[in-house]
Amino acid sequence: MLDNALRLQYLQALGIDVWIPKADSVQPPCAMASGLVQALQPPTPAIPVALAAETEATGWDALETAVAGCTRCGLCNTRKHTVFGTGNRQADWLFIGEGPGQHEDEQGKPFVGNAGQLLTEMIRAIGLSRDAVFITNVVKCRPPGNRDPHSDEIASCHPYLQQQINLIQPKIIVALGRIAAQKLLKTDAPLAQLRGKPHYFSGVPLVVVYHPAYLLRTPIDKRKAWQDLQFAVQLHNSQPT
């Protein structure tokens, strides 16, 4: 964990004043933070979608090779690089965005632009580093013009994401933004209704937070983002070791 001085540095990078994150002002309500977390049991995980032949991988190398050569949807025709994901492949924390942008498509890595820099600070603010978590997206190729990924594109990529989750076995998933949250949870509910409560994806606790790109456009909501991150830490710490 970070000492107070270093944590303060990261909170300032998020644009959060020192006095804002007081314990009784940022902690989720008790019913949500303890009773609800304990009472709300994860649903029985659905049987994973059958993997296509190219994703029947027994390990990371085979899976990454399958993603790099994937032609299962039309995004393969416009991409420069697939964006498989980076980080600790045995991480407790899995961060999932919606899809690569221009910088990610050029470099083949997730969250490398300005939004990626903010995501790094968000991760550091909870006492972790990017190397300690795993970061990926719902789709592994950039949608043209950074549009939202289509349903068929998400369905084509889902087996890859499911296999990543199976291999990582995270203790918590953080859905970054509305699109990722809605697609993972199969809901049309707005972000405001999805934040601040525990969800489950493939039996793994999932927390919804604002997308870093949104926070760059709407910095006033960084305070809410800090609350979401604290709730995620609390939910993670409530999981069996």
Image: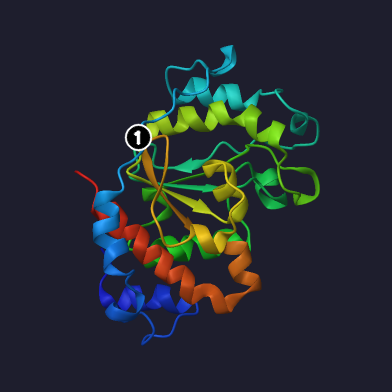
User: Which residue is under mark 1?
Assistant: 169
In the displayed structure, 116 sits above or below 59; it is below
Colour style of the rendered protein structure: rainbow
**Position of residue 224 measured from the top left corner of the image (x, y, whole percent):** 47, 72
Specify whether 148 is left or right of 186. Answer: right
Residue at horizontal 36 percent and vertical 58 percent from the top: 232
Residue closest to the eye, 212 or 116: 212
Residue 35 visible, this angle: yes
In the displayed structure, 158 sits above or below 191; it is above
In this rendering, the count of numbered labels is 1
Specify whether 29 is left or right of 107. Answer: left
Specify whether 43 is left or right of 141. Answer: left
**Position of residue 145 measured from the top left corner of the image (x, y, whole percent):** 80, 50
Residue closest to the eye, 141 or 153: 153
What's the amino acid at mark 1? Gln
- Quadrant housing residue 177: bottom right
Classify the position of the C terminus by image quarter.
Answer: top left
Specify whether 220 is left or right of 204. Answer: right
Furthest-top residue in this view: 53
Residue 209 visible, this angle: no
